[in-house]
Amino acid sequence: MGTPEFAAIILKRLINSPFKPYLVITEPDKPSGRGKTLTPPAVKILAKQENIETWQPKYISQIANRLSELMPDLFIVAAYGQIIPKDILNAAQFGGINVHPSLLPKYRGSTPIQSAILNGDKITGITIMKMDEKMDHGPILTQREVEVPNDFSFPDLNTGLAKKGASQLIGTIPLYLSKSVRGRSQNNENATYTKKIIKRDGLINWREKSKIIDRKIRAYYPWPGAHTIINGKKIKICQSHLENDKLIIDRVQLEGKKEMTFDEFKRGWRGNLDFLDKIS
């Protein structure tokens, strides 16, 4: 069970392992882009390429009976987007295990990768846990720390964690099935939770410190995109870096246009760029 690119990377590794799934469950196709074209999730695209049966219920509870009839051995979940009810988890002989990109109980929820970047964390990680009916709450089976480079954006860290998580998963499955690892309970008093990211989170406040703006640019790329509004036009800041604690903008995208270097943008822009004077 999974939906975005993070889950697709893990699925690819499972397909090429002794644990190839015979069923993939993902979210329904959704409108995407300016034309609102109905677009399948990354996991569905890969499953179709590999001729794996795919189900796309709006709500996972809608297929509880069908899953019970299958009598599966194990559910593997990565960034699915819904909490799996207890009756569905119990339908599999070995229940479900989840690949979560943080060092649980830190950053429970749907945006742990963005949260690590926004908070300037030097270390994050991967947790493989046995699932229960609560969000990111079950016993930890294995856990691995991962360094967060200073210049990593969301796609960089997302891909890196997915690849490390896939390797960790392949190593954990046989230990779990043989009961060589039973898991340890999470310390719920230390739990922290991430928030759902919405479009307006990307609007830059140029009065914030440069390091905070830089983190937002990296965490919110490509969606919702850190952006500013100039003369009524939305300008997405796609890439930046810090030099002596000063924010340097590298790449931008004007609404409706292709991404370009900031120098290219300045040569073609006829308006003011007063926001540059506010960067501290």
Image (cartoon, rainbow, N blue to C red):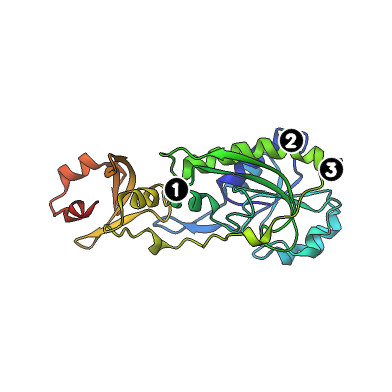
Q: Secondary structure at mark 1?
A: loop
Q: Residue at x 47, y 43 (%)?
A: 155
Tell me whether the residue at label 2 lies in contact with that at label 3, contact meaning CB atoms closer than 8 angstroms.
no
User: CA–CA distance between discs 2 and 1?
Assistant: 30 Å
Residue 29 in the image, given as x and y percentages of width and height: 57, 57
What's the CA distance linking mark 3 and mark 1?
A: 37 Å
In this orientation, which residue lies closer to the viewer: 59 or 173?
A: 173
Circle 2: residue type:
Gly
Residue 227, picture quadrant: bottom left
Q: Circle 3 sits on which residue?
A: 177
Q: Does 34 sit above or below residue 267?
A: below
Residue found at x 21% / y 40%: 264
Residue 267: percent from left, percent from top = 15, 42
Sequence-earlier tag: 3 or 1: 1
Which numbered tag is attached to residue 249? none
Left or right of residue 11: residue 198: left
Amino acid at pointer 1: Gly
Is any atom of residue 49 visible in this view?
no
* Marks 2 and 3, the one that precedes in the sequence: 2
Distance, label 2 to label 3, CA atoms, is: 11 Å
Q: Which residue is mark 2?
A: 171
For the residue carrying disc 2, how many other residues have a C-alpha within 10 Å: few (<14), some (14-19), or many (20+)? Answer: few
Q: Which mark is residue 120?
A: 1
Helix, strand or loop at label 3? It is helix
Q: Earlier in the sequence, mark 2 or mark 1?
A: 1
Q: Residue at x 59, y 48 (%)?
A: 102
